[in-house]
Image (cartoon, rainbow, N blue to C red):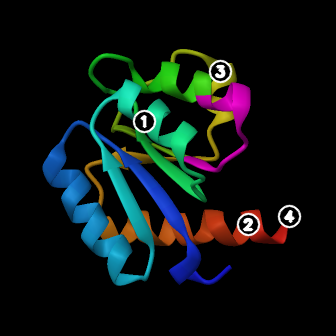
Amino acid sequence: MALKDVRVLVVDDERRLVDILSIYLQDEGIAVTGVFDGPAALQAAAAQRYDLILLDLHLPALCGLEVLRALRRSSDVPILIMTARGETIPDADLALAADDFIFKPFRPREVVERIKALLEREASS
């Protein structure tokens, strides 16, 4: 899969973080949509096919765990969870539903590399 054909949904209530990640991903040729709460994430995922979703756990209106549950009922899109360092995932089944986790704070370049790895793994399966 060529990165220029890749679409990523970035979901985080920190607009600055969404903007920074968008810049790094777009520099790789990846098309990015950013949303800032759980309901907007579900609406975006229903309206458009994404190759990967980068999802924060702490979201307003509908938490990231609920978004993950809802997404997994209808999709097997790769999901990379962003969470605060030291935070525990309350439900082991949900931990299994995510494809990877990355802990904040992180370097944007690390996120890009993880996304590339997930996309490569998905393409080869």
- Residue 99 screen position, x and y as percent: 64, 46
Q: CA distance from mark 1 to mark 3?
A: 22 Å
Counting other residues with Cα less than 10 Å from the Cα at mark 1, is it few (<14), some (14-19), or many (20 or more)? many
Q: Residue at x 44, y 52 (%)?
A: 9
Residue 87 visible, this angle: no
Distance from disc 2 to disc 1, alpha carbons, whole Å, reads 24 Å
Residue tagged by mark 1?
41
Instruction: Identify the mark nearer the N-term, 1 or 4.
Output: 1
User: Which mark's residue is nearer the viewer, 3 or 2?
Assistant: 2
Residue at 57%, 77% (x, y): give it: 5
Determine contact: label 4, label 2, CB under 8 Å: yes
Image location (x, y in percent) of residue 35? 31, 43
Disc 4 residue type (three-letter)? Ser
User: Label 2: which residue?
Assistant: 121
Residue 92: mark in rendering: 3
Q: Does the magenta run of residues contain 24?
A: no
Q: Which residues are magenta?
A: 71-79
**Which of pointers 1 and 4 indicates the residue nearer the eye?**
1
